Structures are given as C-alpha cells and as structure tokens.
Amino acid sequence: MDTIQSGYKGVRLLMNLNWDRLLYICTIVFALWLGAFIGSLL
C-alpha cells in the first residue's frame, strides 16, 4: 500500500510541475484541429 501511495504522490508531483506543458500541447492540438476543420469548410 505504501508503494502505491508513494507512486501516486510521484505522479501528482509530475502533474503539478508539468501542467502548463500539458495545457500548451492541448492548445496546439486544438488549434491545429480547428484550422483543419475551417480549412475543410472552405
């Protein structure tokens, strides 16, 4: 149980440190998808 809790804490720490990078990647993917969608309508 201690191993699971320490692993969860480690994942949580990584998410706290890298949430802005994840947001950045999601923003780029959304912008590319939106550009492709608008391009397909024209």
Image (cartoon, helix red, strand yellow):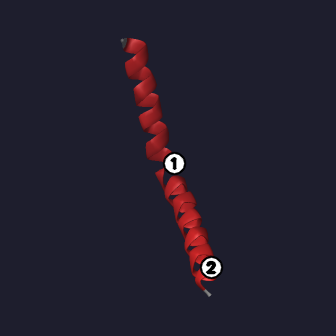
Which residue shows up at 62% across the image and 79% down it? 40
Which residue occupies the foreground of this view, 26 or 37?
A: 37
- Dot 2 lies on which element? helix
- Whole-percent x and y of residue 39? 63, 81
Which residue shows up at 58% across the image and 83% down it? 41
- Whole-percent x and y of residue 10? 46, 30
Q: Do the residues labelled 1 and 2 touch (CB within 8 Å)?
A: no
Q: Mark 1 points at which residue?
A: 18
Residue density around tag 2, few if under 14, some if 14–19, many if 20 or more, within 10 Å: few
Q: In this view, does 21 lie above or below 8?
A: below
Left or right of 39, for residue 6: left
- Dot 1 lies on which element? helix
Residue farthest along the top direction in this orientation? 1
Left or right of 24, for residue 2: left
Q: Using the numbered discs, state the Cα–Cα distance from disc 1 to disc 2 in whole angstroms.
A: 33 Å
Q: Quadrant of the N terminus?
A: top left
Q: Quadrant of residue 12?
A: top left
Which residue occupies the foreground of this view, 11 or 30?
A: 30
Which residue shows up at 41% across the image and 27% down it? 8
State the count of labels.
2
Residue farthest along the front direction in this orientation? 41
Q: Is residue 30 above or below residue 23?
A: below
The mark lying in front, picked from 1 and 2, is 2
Q: In which quarter of the image is the C terminus?
A: bottom right
Identity, as a three-letter code, of the amino acid under mark 1 = Asn
Which residue occupies the foreground of this view, 27 or 6?
A: 27
Identity, as a three-letter code, of the amino acid under mark 2 = Ser
Which residue shows up at 58% across the image and 69% down it? 33
- Whole-percent x and y of residue 38? 57, 81
- Disc number for residue 40: 2
Q: Which of marks 1 and 2 is nearer the N terminus?
A: 1
Residue density around tag 1, few if under 14, some if 14–19, many if 20 or more, within 10 Å: few
